[in-house]
Image (cartoon, rainbow, N blue to C red):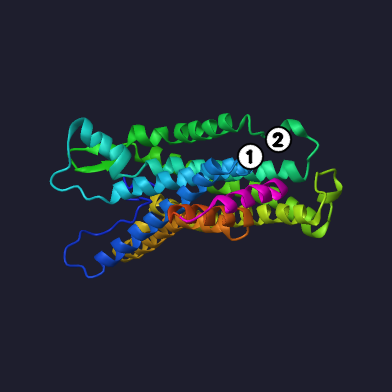
């Protein structure tokens, strides 16, 4: 969330350097998360660019999550750069408040990730539970329109935040001004859209898939194009990957949404002691959101042999090792069991 709204930012709210002994450690830790996450998510994008057999609907949507994570990490890095001297006034100050200092852009990327994960669950549901209903499936020809639509919807939903938050010269802070009550209602609605609605949709889709795969054994008997045990294994792997990706996302962001509600409801401000405890709790949650962005590439690689092989190929290519035979082997394998 945005630092403009009662200093609630996705980026860790570091204290001024001063003489605090832990400041350097915290900065090193945060920048390590950012760098690792940027490199890992860049690998995800590179996989789709290099290997044609990986260009499936599911993988394109996973790349959209990776791009959202990269955007979050980059804007968080910009947010961490200290502004020395008095805060700029005029158009520059307004721009910094809306896009850099408050890190509002990360709300767009959070919504993009939420919408994409929800769409992935619905897509897998139709692919595995209702495979004969072709009209509800997303093919690679339409995926570009779907991704653009996701970003447009996310931007539209965050537009009120960009419009209302601005630099207030009198108080020298970035805030929604006199629109606090309206902003409170907006934040509550945004938290529901970010967490509750997607959670119920995703839970329904994956519970049906898990039931069909592991308990009812009904998925492979409904006309799907699963002809070998290896293909069935790959279907299960991609389901495990998506469930793990979604679970980690909600573990990272549901507590943060709860923290926002506590902040705007005033429950965290009833005493100085509660406010101090809440601020420490909030900083811990902010680190958790950054870790989520950096962990996703590892989640991709653990259950998926295809991603592990592709990552290994890219790593060897960076080290200028011989990779031609390995490339051919990956492409050959990919034609057999693309996830």
Location of residue 187 in the rendering, given as x and y in whole percent from the top left corner:
44, 43
Q: Nearer the viewer, residue 257 or 230?
A: 230
Q: Residue at x 50, y 45 (%)?
A: 46
Q: Nearer the viewer, residue 4 or 214?
A: 214
Q: Is residue 322 magenta?
A: yes
The tag earlier along the polypeptide, 1 or 2, is 1
Q: Which residues are magenta?
A: 321-339
Q: Is residue 113 magenta?
A: no
Q: How many marks?
A: 2
Count residues near mark 1 (Cα–Cα under 10 Å), then give few for <14, some for 14-19, many for 20+: many
Q: Is residue 29 visible?
A: yes
Q: Which mark is residue 137?
A: 2
Location of residue 255 in the rendering, given as x and y in whole percent from the top left corner:
48, 57
Give the quadrant of residue 120: top right
Q: Nearer the viewer, mark 1 or mark 2?
A: 1
Q: Nearer the viewer, residue 65 or 204?
A: 65
Q: Nearer the viewer, residue 101 or 303?
A: 303
Tag 1–tag 2 contact (CB < 8 Å): yes
Q: Is residue 176 visible?
A: no
Give the quadrant of residue 274: bottom left
Give the quadrant of residue 36: bottom left
What's the CA distance linking mark 1 and mark 2?
Answer: 10 Å
Label 2 secondary element: loop
Residue holding disc 1? 57
């Amino acid at each position: 969330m945005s630092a403009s709204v009662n200093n609630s930012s996705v980026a860790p709210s570091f204290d001024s350097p001063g003489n605090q002994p832990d400041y350097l450690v915290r900065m090193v830790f945060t920048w390590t998360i950012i760098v690792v996450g940027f490199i890992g998510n860049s690998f995800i994008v590179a996989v789709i660019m290099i290997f044609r057999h990986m260009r499936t609907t599911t993988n394109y949507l996973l790349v959209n999550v990776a791009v959202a994570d990269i955007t979050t990490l980059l804007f968080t890095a910009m947010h961490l750069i200290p502004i020395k001297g008095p805060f700029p006034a005029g158009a520059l100050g307004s721009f910094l408040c809306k896009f850099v200092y408050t890190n509002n852009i990360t709300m767009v990327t959070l919504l993009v990730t939420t919408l994409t994960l929800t769409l992935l669950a619905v897509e897998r549901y139709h692919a595995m539970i209702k495979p004969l209903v072709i009209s509800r499936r997303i093919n690679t020809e339409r995926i570009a329109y779907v991704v653009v639509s996701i970003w447009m919807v996310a931007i539209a939903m965050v537009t009120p935040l960009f419009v209302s938050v601005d630099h207030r010269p009198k108080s020298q802070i970035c805030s929604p001004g006199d629109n606090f009550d309206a902003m409170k209602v907006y934040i509550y609605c945004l938290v529901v859209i970010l967490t509750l609605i997607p959670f119920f949709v995703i839970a329904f889709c994956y519970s049906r898939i898990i039931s069909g795969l592991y308990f009812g054994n009904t998925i492979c008997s409904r006309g799907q194009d699963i002809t070998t045990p290896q293909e069935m294994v790959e279907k299960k792997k991609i389901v495990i990957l998506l469930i793990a990706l979604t679970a980690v996302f909600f573990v990272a962001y549901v507590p943060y949404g709860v923290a926002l509600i506590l902040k705007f409801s005033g429950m965290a401000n009833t005493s100085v002691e509660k406010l101090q405890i809440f601020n420490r709790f909030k900083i811990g949650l902010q680190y958790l959101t950054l870790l989520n962005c950096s962990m996703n590439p590892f989640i991709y690689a653990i259950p998926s042999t295809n991603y592990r092989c592709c990552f290994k190929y890219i790593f060897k290519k960076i080290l200028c090792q011989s990779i031609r035979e390995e490339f051919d082997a990956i492409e050959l394998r990919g034609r057999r069991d693309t996830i």
